[in-house]
Image: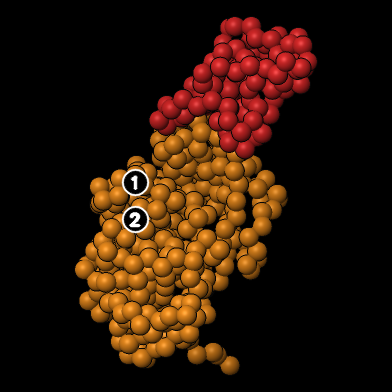
Chain colours: A orange, B red
Amino acid sequence: MTRYDAIVIGGGLVGSAIAYGLAREGLRVALVDEGDVAYRASRGNFGLVWVQSKGDGAPHYQRWTRRSADQWPALAAELSARTGISVGHERPGGIHLCLGEAELEERRARMERMRIQSGNFGFEYRMLDHRELADMLPGLGPSVTGASWTPYDGHANPLNLLHALHKAFVEKGGRYIPNTTIGDAKAAARDFRIAIGDREIGAPKVVLAAGLGNSGLAPLFGLSAPVEPQRGQILVTERAQRVLPMPTTTIRQTVEGGIMLGDSQEDVGFDTSQKPVIMQTIARRAVLSFPWVRDLRIVRAWAALRVMPPDGLPIYDQSERFPGAFTANCHSGVTLAAAHANLYAPMVAAGALDPALDLFSARRFDVPALA
Amino acid sequence: MFRRWPDADPATIAVIVEGRTALVPPGASAAAAVLVAGFRHIRETPVEGRERSPYCMMGICFDCLAEIDGVPNRQSCMVEARPGMRIRRQIRARKIDPAPQ
């Protein structure tokens, strides 16, 4: 049996960010990756590093997201220096466009709630009317009534991020085990043994970061990860000269010039097929927001499954029954990549999650049923 | 650089590639016309400006992007050459005119 200091199960954005962070802490780490046959939300991600929409009613999530966004520039620079791969990160602030008065009023109320909930941590935002917004975003459609803006938001290239994390992990001495589905798992406190193919690897620490696979894996380690798939569909246009100076929740122009359109949400189980009716809705909203999008050719489109906890917030835990077993679950693998590499991994290395993460425990779902 | 098969149909379709007239047989693609016109590359990539020529000639590789009759970024291998068609090479990213309509 080959022994490591830690085994990370799941080689998507969550797993590879944590594995890289652990390797950087000096641990001997194995990263077990099912491979591209997995659902792999990391391949379908929209690529926002997004703060402004997250954590209404959950200020701890607002803080965690923002801490990650604050760590992002350092992570991007570090990955670029270590691997030569640019992850295309920019943080020019971000916009949430509102079509119609009802959307604008709902947004205004939500942003103000989040500001109040943020307390001393603060939450800087502005509501912009159509005219102000038209000065910031060229060719704004007349249906756009206004928008919210915060300085915290940005975007990145998810595929380059995944590539860079893998490369940096291996260069830090990490052992990447691809195309491998884990078999039998034996859990004891700080002693985990995992069958991969016809051999076994062991470690005093294990991190479950297998996305939708975590729901089945977690109980083997005395953990709970009740995540469900939520389908999102994305359209991408041909590359064009850059005109959008900052990303919006549903439309962003990448560093390379392609314009991504997305943010659909459907609960359809493990179905990754694309549906024209959703694609039409996405395209229609994009054209209402920016009429010039109409002239651009769509060159690619896809669907992928988000890893969605019941309340939309991440789940982080260390097993009480089998200390040393950790889990990380979220639908924001890009946004939270910097938190996972720079904040979460050092906690795992130290053997205890920070009390700031207590509220993210899956224990929050253990509410006694009322009669 | 490129020679046509001797038994090909006569080149009777005249298109204009970057201002030069090129003659191709009926059914030939716009990408073929660019090659016949003697251009070494048909596009320069949007980010790094690398030179690319038509490659797969069957609609897969997107390396034959060209501006055809004023429409940028068209896959020229998938467009049949027509008399008087104006073809320009796709030099880096296409432009967007975001002016309100």
Residue at horizontal 61 percent and vertical 33 percent from the top: B56
Q: Which residue is mark 1?
A: A85
Q: CA distance from mark 2 to mark 1?
A: 9 Å
The kind of residue on which mark 1 rests is Ile
Of A245 and A332, nearer the camera is: A332
Instruction: Give the letter of the chain under mark 2.
Output: A
Is A171 left, or right, of A106 in this rendering? left
Q: Is residue A140 visible?
A: no
In the image, A60 versus B16, the foreground residue is B16
Q: Position of residue B61 (x, y in %)?
A: 58, 36
Instruction: Tally the numbered discs.
Output: 2
Mark 2 surroundings: few (<14), some (14-19) or many (≥20) residues within 10 A: many
Question: Under tag 1, what secondary structure?
Answer: loop
Image quadrant where residue A288 sits: top right
Q: Are marks 2 and 1 in contact (CB under 8 Å)?
A: yes
| Image location (x, y in percent) of residue B94 | 51, 25
Residue at image coords 60%, 51%: A302
Amino acid at the residue labelled 2: Lys
| Quarter containing the C terminus of chain A | bottom right
Q: Is A192 placed above or below A60 here?
A: below
Residue A180 at x, y = what percent?
48, 70
Using the image, determine if residue A171 lies above or below residue A180: above
Residue B72 position, x and y percent, is 58, 24
In this rendering, the answer to whether B31 lies above or below A298 is above
Which residue does the numbered mark 2 point to in the structure image? A167
Q: Residues within 10 Å of mark 1 (few under 14, many from 20)?
A: some
